[in-house]
């Protein structure tokens, strides 16, 4: 298990300067991620474009997304 929490306390308004988000998006299509667990997953990325990227990659790679909300 790997915890990516590099972006704690950073705004989800833009993903360009969020290393944790970029790492997650890079690892999903490589098949290195089986499950993404989150609290308030809607905060992962505020703009729709940024939110759909991990959703689409997860669907293609068979990665599950889970939210405790």
Image: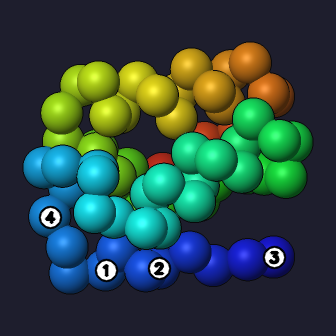
Residue 15's spot in the image, x, y percent? 29, 50
The foreground one among 50 and 65 is 50
Name the residue that disc number 4 marks.
11
Residue located farthest toward the right when viewing the structure as drawn:
31
Is the Cβ of the residue at disc 4 closer than 8 Å to that at disc 1?
no
Mark 2 and mark 1: span between their CA atoms?
6 Å
Mark 4 and mark 2: span between their CA atoms?
13 Å
Q: Earlier in the sequence, mark 4 or mark 2?
A: 2
Is the Cβ of the residue at disc 3 closer than 8 Å to that at disc 1?
no
Name the residue that disc number 3 marks.
1
Name the residue that disc number 1 marks.
8
Q: Earlier in the sequence, mark 3 or mark 4?
A: 3
Is the Cβ of the residue at disc 3 closer than 8 Å to that at disc 4?
no
Q: Quadrant of residue 9?
A: bottom left
Report helix, strand or loop for mark 2. Answer: loop
Q: Quadrant of residue 40?
A: bottom left
Res 34 visible: no
Is the Cβ of the residue at disc 4 closer than 8 Å to that at disc 2?
no
Front of the two marks 3 and 4 = 4
The foreground one among 43 and 18 is 18
Crowd rating for badge 2 (residues with CA inside 10 Å; few <14, some 14–19, many 20+): few
Name the residue that disc number 2 marks.
5
Is the Cβ of the residue at disc 2 closer than 8 Å to that at disc 1?
yes
Q: Earlier in the sequence, mark 3 or mark 1?
A: 3
Residue at 75% from the left image edge and 35% from the top image edge? 29
Position of residue 51 in the picture relative to residue 62 (left or right): left
């Amino acid at each position: 298990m790997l915890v990516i929490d590099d972006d704690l306390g950073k705004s989800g308004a833009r993903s360009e300067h969020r290393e944790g988000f970029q790492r997650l998006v890079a690892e999903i299509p490589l098949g290195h991620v089986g499950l993404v667990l989150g609290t308030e997953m809607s905060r992962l990325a505020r703009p729709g474009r940024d939110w759909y990227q991990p959703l689409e990659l997860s669907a293609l790679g068979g990665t599950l997304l889970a939210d405790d909300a």
